[in-house]
Amino acid sequence: MEKLNKLAIELEQTSESLKLQPDPAAVEAFRIEWLGKKGKIAGLYATMKEIDAADRREAGQRMNRLKQNAESVLEQLEQLCVQSQVQQSLQREPLDVTLPVAEHMQLGSHHPVSLMRRRVFEIFHRLGYVVYDGPDIEDDFYNFEALNIGKDHPARDMADTFFLRSHEYVLRTHTSNTQIHGMLGRTPPIKMISAGRCFRVDNDATHSPMFHQVECLAVDRGLSVGHMKGLIETFLSELFGSRVKTRFRSSFFPFVEPGAEVDCECVLCGGAGCRVCGHSGWIEIGGCGMVDPNVFEAVQIDSEEYSGFAFGFGIDRMAMLAFGLPDLRDLFVGDTRLLSQFPDQPYFSH
């Protein structure tokens, strides 16, 4: 009881002293000293087992009152600190907005992903494609069902997809969902391109859990694999230069048939092989193929009359190659020292 009396007096004296000159650092020190896990009041509670049973109830009540008083003092001191800081800011000399801007002022810069996205849109705009946007959060129909991805397809596995609301919604795993939005209620011919964020559970030197993809779709009478291959090669030569080498490898995607993966010669090593390309000389850019008739059926387009092709490329991967970055993850660090080095155009755009 004597210790409680001393602490109550000490608390009052400390609070009166701090109120005269409220300082954030001193107030934080007060909080730690009195209300911290190893503070004075916590130390009191630790001695409860040593108090006689007859006095324990009264001692506990007084400890609680002491703690409440300390909390009240802390709240008052925090309010006084805020008021003091406001008063100090009002007493400072006002800023003269007529002064000239410092010559060494650092300007912002475009992010390499934004630069690459803008460059992609410029190329396809000249080719007669319109830009279409789609949502980042998608329901099952647009992200899976309409794209011929059945309930038992591995792409639905939690290892690949971020699910929301008990699998009712997902963070879209590709920009292919914009194909469905773009085709529903429209009559071909359709020439559209879309770019945006995608999300998959993946993270290494050439993959990121959040990445950017560009999707291209063309639907018309008589379109063939030759049209698709010609468009992709034209696009990549515009992006990386006329000497860039590409290759198509047969692959399976549920929403195209036939399907292929598109590789680009590693611009970083010139095809000689390096860590980024896995010493193969090639880096996968994305996937492509002729639109599966089941997808046309989902959007009520006659697959007997129309054909189409689509491809999805990674904007981050293309930016990584175009700007000579050895690690895809550098694009997501947010280091201004890195981002400020990028020009308005990729190194290999001509």
Image (cartoon, rainbow, N blue to C red):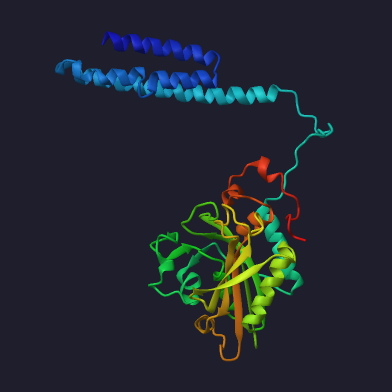
Q: In the image as oriented, which residue stretches furthest toward the front? A: 272
For this rendering, which residue is in front, 221 or 141? 221
Q: Confirm whether residue 84 shows in the render.
A: yes
| Residue 219 coordinates in the image, percent (x, y) | 63, 81
| Residue positioned 49% across, 20% down in the render | 27
- Quadrant showing the C terminus: bottom right
Answer left or right for 153 relative to 21: left
Give the answer, above or below, for where 296 lies relative to 8.
below
- Quadrant showing the N terminus: top left
For this rendering, which residue is in front, 223 or 348? 348
| Residue positioned 48% across, 75% down in the render | 254
| Residue 103 coordinates in the image, percent (x, y) | 82, 34
When asked about the image quadrant of residue 3, the answer is: top left
Q: Confirm whether residue 182 shows in the render.
A: no
| Residue 6 coordinates in the image, percent (x, y) | 34, 8
| Residue 316 coordinates in the image, percent (x, y) | 61, 57
Q: In the image as oriented, which residue stretches furthest toward the bottom? A: 304
Give the answer, above or below, for where 13 lies relative to 337.
above
Answer left or right for 204 relative to 129: left
Give the answer, above or below, for where 263 lies relative to 327.
below
Answer left or right for 332 relative to 40: right
| Residue positioned 47% across, 73% down in the render | 141
| Residue positioned 71% across, 44% down in the render | 340
Tag count: 0
